[in-house]
Image: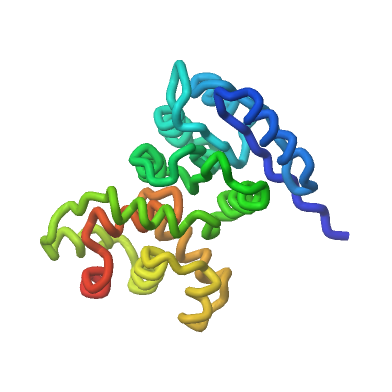
Amino acid sequence: MREPAQPIRVAVVDDQRLFSSGIAMLVEAQSDLVCVGTAADGQEAVSLVERERPDVVLMDLRMPVLNGLDATRRILADTPADGPPRVVALTTIRRDEAVYAALAAGASAFLTKDADPEVVLATIRAAHAGAPFPTEENAMALVREYAAPAGDQRESRVDALASLTAREREVFALVARGLSNAEIASGQFVTEATVKSHVRSTLQKLGLRSRIQVVIFAYENGLTGRDERESA
């Protein structure tokens, strides 16, 4: 008999205790999720992650002692054998430079604090799976607004992807356009598992942690639209 999958371990970090308690209760009500703890500031969050090794961390960005952005950077700089957790940034403002900074630092997704419970749960599961998340379209808009291109020199664009194989460059370009693994698999006539393998390899070679970082990398290196096809 097949063993049941282990539940996704979630940590909730927010200085508003009522909010974090509510999210913890929502998580605990799901059969595939478990809340391993809450923290009220970034320093507590770092300690909680070190102690409990959650799979996903919901991280408020504006907190006392240590803000969520710096806590995210510290957590993602830690590289245990099983890898750092996926971080989901929590914000009250959808179009916020701090959210972009968190995504650029390696957060896998973001949520507004007024999100519906279904969106919160879907985002946790998507972040854990490395899949597109419900607010990804808004994240793309943030990238377009805040990402600063490094320059227009073709040589620098080619060098940015020099470590990738031809197929990985194709996958990079499609992820940078916001396509899901399923959409890429359908368009390339390969299995979704093959696409996931290429995405993992691309992230590792480029030193990136999430799909949204691929989009940011593409914008900052002038690898969008026509440029990404030229560099491939």
Q: Which residue is at a point 51% across and 38% down the rendered structure image?
A: 90
Q: Quadrant of the N terminus?
A: bottom right
Tell me how many marks there are: 0
Q: Which residue is at a point 51% across and 74% down the rendered structure image?
A: 183
| Frontmost residue, 218 versus 40 | 40
Looking at the image, residue 36 sits to the left or right of residue 197; the answer is right
Colour logic = rainbow
* On screen, residue 185 above or below 22: below
Q: Position of residue 125 (x, y in %)?
A: 63, 52
Q: Quadrant of the C terminus?
A: bottom left
Q: Which residue is at a point 58% across and 46% down the rendered structure image?
A: 115
Q: Position of residue 176 (x, y in %)?
A: 37, 63
Looking at the image, which residue sits at the far left? Answer: 153
Residue 47 visible within the image? no
| Frontmost residue, 7 versus 42 | 42
Looking at the image, which residue sits at the far right? Answer: 1
Looking at the rendering, which quadrant does residue 16 occupy? Answer: top right
Looking at the image, residue 91 sits to the left or right of residue 166; the answer is right
Looking at the image, which residue sits at the far bottom? Answer: 189
| Frontmost residue, 217 versus 58 | 58
Q: Which residue is at a point 76% across and 52% down the rendered structure image?
A: 5
Q: Position of residue 3 (x, y in %)?
A: 82, 54
Q: Position of residue 14 (x, y in %)?
A: 56, 27
* On screen, residue 93 above or below 150: above
* On screen, residue 21 above or below 229: above
Looking at the image, residue 99 sits to the left or right of residue 18; the answer is left
